[in-house]
Image: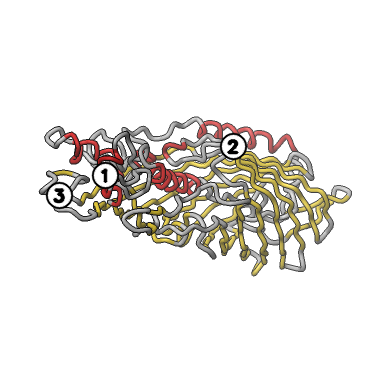
């Protein structure tokens, strides 16, 4: 049975842990010529120093002036829908990379003290990515490190190896356009006829993430815990794009990547890759135990995440986030169910707030083995702010619509199953293993997220 350590014996360890966290937080991210967000945008650039979707072939000085202008007709500044597709992919990546779960604030057997005598309130080692109502107790410390590794595989259920996009021509209307088109109305989409040309895209994206989180929790009183989490993150990205101009009639081309109008090159590919390493978004956590009996506990948790990670290198969200949760847990022998409900506030107009719900149990299978099972969910509030462009409707030469992407327009609710074990390696050391598996396909997801960790409490 663990002893209740006095405050003065725990303070040096806490000081060391916090000093280490501050040192890690000061580490800069890996410097590279291009940031990861820029490298994603490079998949849409087919000429050195050009804008995304710029057609260098259509804009070369050797072509007639009437053809030269066609080089800019697909760039995001000319067609807002095109820019929103590129922005959606970059934002979804940044949000998903930064949403890696961190370990629980308490671990191992916990106690309450009655007349100076320790009384056990939890016999199992506790949950892994959920919270239980018990706190550590005054003067006790939990220090841990875990490593999570995963590779994204889908975006709203669509394989990242096969993301289809269609970029459309801007609606051109200028003085004298109606007369040039034989009296047709150039304000209609499809007039002139070259507005019907499109650029088909296929993306193959590979994003792998490794996160090593250092965390410590300190029992300020018997009912209040304070903790700090410092993640070190490595993100690796590689991608290939294949683009093709889809002509719309005629014997010569106005839109092409290279060549001439009579001998155009209508296909292009681009490959880019990069990786970065640095500090992620640092978290500070406070848990307050509101009620506790021998078999039941109720607590409240506030988890603040600060934008210390470099958002341009996909190491952080780029904004402040706050999780507030109510925690209820019980114990029936060696079986301990728990329920966490709460709200996630994101201080960014482009990201949705979310309702949080986690339910599960931890069960002491033997003197040194605890099974932890949870359903971990996050439900977005309101319509998604990561909005995809709407279908494009053409007026001429006949009415039709084009869907600009194969990415489904669905909610980014996240439901995961967590299955893991905690092994008591020695009196105060716990080894953690866990698998997090998606149970739905909202957002950008990995097929599995593996976590291994080590915890030490005293």
Residue picked out by circle 1 = 181
Q: Name which residue lies at 39% across and 45% down.
A: 86
Residue 222 visible in this rendered orientation of the protein: yes
Residue picked out by circle 3 = 252
Colour pattern of the rendering = secondary structure
Q: Nearer the viewer, residue 127 or 31?
A: 31
Q: Is residue 314 left or right of residue 455?
A: left
Relative vertical location of residue 109 with respect to residue 98 in this rendering, above or below: below
As helix, strand or loop, the secondary structure at mark 2 comes to loop
Residue picked out by circle 2 = 320
Residue 39 visible in this rendered orientation of the protein: no
Q: Nearer the viewer, residue 310 or 125?
A: 310
As helix, strand or loop, the secondary structure at mark 3 comes to loop
Occupied quadrant, residue 415: bottom right
Q: How many neighbours does mark 1 have within 10 angstroms: few (below 14), some (14-19), or many (20 or more)?
A: few
Q: Is residue 265 left or right of residue 345?
A: left
In the orientation shown, which residue stands out farthest toward the right?
115
Q: CA distance from mark 2 to mark 3?
A: 53 Å
Q: Earlier in the sequence, mark 2 or mark 1?
A: 1
Q: Which quadrant would the N terminus be assigned to in this image?
A: bottom right
Can you tell which mark lies on residue 407? none
Total marks in image: 3
Q: Position of residue 374 (x, y in %)?
A: 62, 63
Q: Position of residue 291 (x, y in %)?
A: 83, 52
Q: CA distance from mark 2 to mark 1?
A: 53 Å
Q: Name which residue lies at 39% across and 40% down.
A: 37
Occupied quadrant, residue 128: bottom right
As helix, strand or loop, the secondary structure at mark 1 comes to loop
């Amino acid at each position: 049975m663990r002893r209740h350590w006095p405050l003065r014996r725990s303070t040096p360890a806490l000081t060391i842990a916090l000093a280490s966290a501050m040192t890690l937080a000061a580490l800069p991210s890996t410097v590279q010529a291009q940031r990861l967000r820029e490298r994603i945008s490079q998949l849409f650039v087919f000429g050195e120093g050009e804008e995304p979707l710029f057609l260098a072939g259509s804009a070369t000085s050797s072509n007639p002036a009437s053809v030269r202008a066609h080089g800019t007709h697909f760039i995001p500044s000319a067609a807002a829908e095109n820019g929103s597709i590129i922005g959606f992919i970059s934002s979804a990546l940044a949000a998903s990379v930064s949403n890696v779960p961190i370990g629980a604030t308490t671990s191992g057997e916990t106690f309450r003290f009655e007349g100076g005598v320790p009384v056990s309130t939890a016999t199992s080692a506790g949950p892994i990515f959920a919270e239980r109502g018990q706190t550590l107790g005054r003067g006790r410390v939990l220090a841990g490190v875990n490593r999570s590794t995963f590779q994204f595989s889908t975006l709203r259920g669509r394989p990242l190896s096969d993301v289809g996009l269609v970029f459309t021509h801007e609606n051109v209307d200028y003085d004298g356009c109606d007369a040039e088109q034989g009296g047709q109305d150039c304000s209609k989409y499809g007039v002139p006829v070259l507005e019907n040309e499109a650029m088909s895209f296929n993306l193959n994206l590979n994003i792998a993430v490794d996160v090593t989180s250092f965390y410590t929790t300190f029992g300020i009183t018997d009912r209040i815990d304070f903790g700090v989490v410092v993640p070190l993150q490595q993100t690796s990205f590689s991608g290939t794009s294949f683009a093709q101009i889809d002509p719309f009639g005629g014997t010569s081309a106005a839109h092409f990547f290279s060549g001439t109008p009579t001998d155009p090159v209508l296909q292009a590919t681009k490959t880019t890759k990069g990786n970065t390493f640095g500090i992620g978004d640092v978290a500070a956590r406070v848990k307050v135990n509101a009620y506790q009996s021998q078999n039941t506990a109720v607590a409240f948790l506030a988890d603040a995440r600060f934008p210390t990670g470099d958002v341009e290198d996909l190491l952080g969200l780029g904004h402040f986030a706050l999780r507030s949760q109510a925690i209820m847990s019980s114990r029936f022998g060696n079986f301990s169910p728990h329920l966490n409900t709460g709200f996630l506030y994101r201080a960014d107009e482009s990201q949705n707030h979310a309702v949080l719900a986690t339910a599960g149990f931890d069960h002491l299978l033997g003197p040194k083995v605890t099974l932890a099972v949870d359903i971990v969910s996050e439900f977005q509030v309101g319509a998604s702010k990561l909005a995809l462009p709407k279908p494009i409707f053409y007026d001429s030469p006949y009415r039709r619509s084009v869907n600009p992407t194969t990415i489904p327009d669905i909610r980014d609710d996240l439901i995961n199953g967590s299955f893991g074990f905690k092994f008591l390696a020695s009196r105060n050391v716990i080894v953690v293993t866990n698998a997090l598996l998606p149970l739905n396909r909202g957002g950008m997801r990995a097929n599995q997220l593996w976590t291994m960790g080590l915890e030490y409490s005293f």
